[in-house]
Image (cartoon, grey):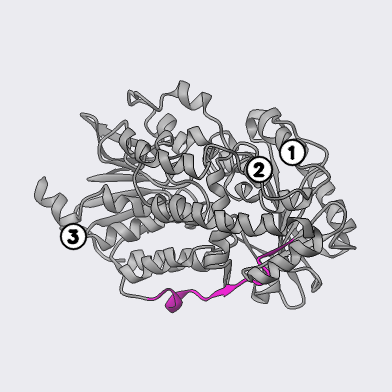
Amino acid sequence: MFDTTEDPRPHAVVIGSGFGGLAAAVRLGARGWRVTVLEKLDAPGGRAYVFRQDGFVFDAGPTIITAPYLLEELWRLCGRRLSDDVALRPMDPFYSIRFPDGSEMACTADLAATRAEVARLAPGDLDGFDRFIRDSERIYDVAFGDLADQPFHSIGALLRAAPDLIRLQGYRTVFGKVGDYFKDKRLRIAFSFHPLLIGGNPMTTTAYYCLIAHLERLHGVHYAMGGMGALVQGLVGLIEGQHGVVRCNAEVTEITTRDGRATGVRLASGERIDADVVVSNADVAWTYSKLLGAQPRKRWTDGKLARARFSMGLFVWYFGTDRRFEEVGHHTILLGPRYEGLLHDIFRRKHLADDFSLYLHRPTATDPSLAPPGGDAFYVLSPVPHLGGGQDWTQLAEPYRAKILARLEETVLPGLGRHVVTSRIMTPLDFRDRLLSVNGAGFSLEPQLFQSAWFRPHNRSEEVENLFLVGAGTHPGAGVPGVISSAKVLDQLVPEGAAFKAKV
């Protein structure tokens, strides 16, 4: 390890090694900072942690890359190419959607192929599809192309963005806007479910998230060979190449302050680490309520955090089989019998319903190395209420897993139960206790209009100087492109290392 005792660069501590924290560390290192990343778990990645079990490899959280250019930027900052360390494979199709009536739709970057799928399912919606595609691009150009990596720290920034918000109808919901284009209920679901990928309810999430349809087509949907852990290790390698340090088994319990400024952190072991700036990739509600719990706060008080709306929880079952299911693709979305009603149960009633919709990930369709020869690795995810619903997952987890198994057997994986040879689950309890996510939420704060942009916790803390926030709970929001973009915002907020040193 590089000896940092004589390193003259100003010191930045990054709390958490999720993609937002790792991207922030790379950017700070490239701009002249000595960086220490502190991770609670025994390996880096945060939500992108990797489970290895009985010869199988399971990505714990994110599974796809939809904006690889953001990663390529990080590698260029270090004088390298992404392809030097990580091999990305484009997905075609991105995913298949299986509707409750048994019909299916393949989603792909090929516009003509997707149009043909719409024509097959609902020819009367072709004109609406064409309009939706045009409008999705317009929204993308503003909401992601122009705003995703820009700070929203002033009312002025919000007001400057307001005319576009009105023109593009960002004040509406995704589901409401999609209904303008499609009459077929299946297509309304197929083109509105995307906010669930970043913790949002399509019934309440700002229509700006219609941009995801264009994002997928413009940049493609990619898989990192070796799993997302390969990408995590690649980022760690960049940080270490800049003479930064990534420390695991190093849980931060306090951000230390003096005279309203962050001065470093204290670990669970009692060790104190001084820093010139602190960047928190921890859950924003945890950062303010726990890591700054003793610090007087004006905006993000415990009361306001208690009133905030958090994303749904996640139930994830990881399992490996002793046979391959070649007929199942890399990504499959299995929709349940209800859509609006199920979302209402999850987000508003916080009720664990008897029915569910599932996201099934079979990475060994692309990368057989993640399972022993002749086997498959799987991950199936079900959106569920966060812990505010009061469910006791210590009692519910196994019955819920069994229900998911039965659903998979009767749809796309017949006979599955006879072939499962390894298994593990994550529930909202794991998100709370393992990942320190308030309410066990899968994606921190819910991305609705009045919890977005200026209304979201700012990338530069409103409470403490020299404290900065990255990750799912700050601007622009969750998802791999969002959290990596949150780190890019720091380029406009944290001075170059040399400039900071000269100032102090």
CA gap, disc 2 and disc 1: 9 Å
Type of the residue with mark 3: Asp
Q: Residues within 10 Å of mark 2 (few under 14, many from 20)?
A: many
Which residue is labeled 1 in the image?
340
205 or 477, which lies in front?
A: 205
Residue occupying image coordinates x 37% and y 37%: 158
Q: Confirm or deny contact between disc 2 and disc 1 (CB under 8 A).
A: yes
- For mark 1, give the secondary structure: helix
Image quadrant occupied by the N terminus: bottom left
Q: Which of marks 2 and 1 is nearer the N terminus?
A: 2
Direction top: furthest residue? 303
Q: Does the segment drawn in magenta span residue 83?
A: yes
Q: Which mark is residue 175?
A: 2
Above or below residue 282? Residue 141 is: below
* Front residue of this view, candidates 6 and 236: 236
Disc 3, SS: loop
Q: Mark 3 points at which residue?
A: 7
Classify residue 251 as left or right of residue 276: right
Does residue 17 appear anywhere in the picture? no
Residue 338, picture quadrant: top right
Query: Residue at point 54% right, 62% down?
Result: 66
Q: Which amino acid does label 2 sit on?
A: Phe
First reached walking from the N terminus: tag 2 or tag 3: 3
Q: Which of marks 1 and 3 is nearer the N terminus?
A: 3
Query: Residue 90 vs residue 424: left or right?
Result: left
Where in the figure is residue 143, as x and y percent of width and height? 46, 49
The magenta-colored residue range is 81-96
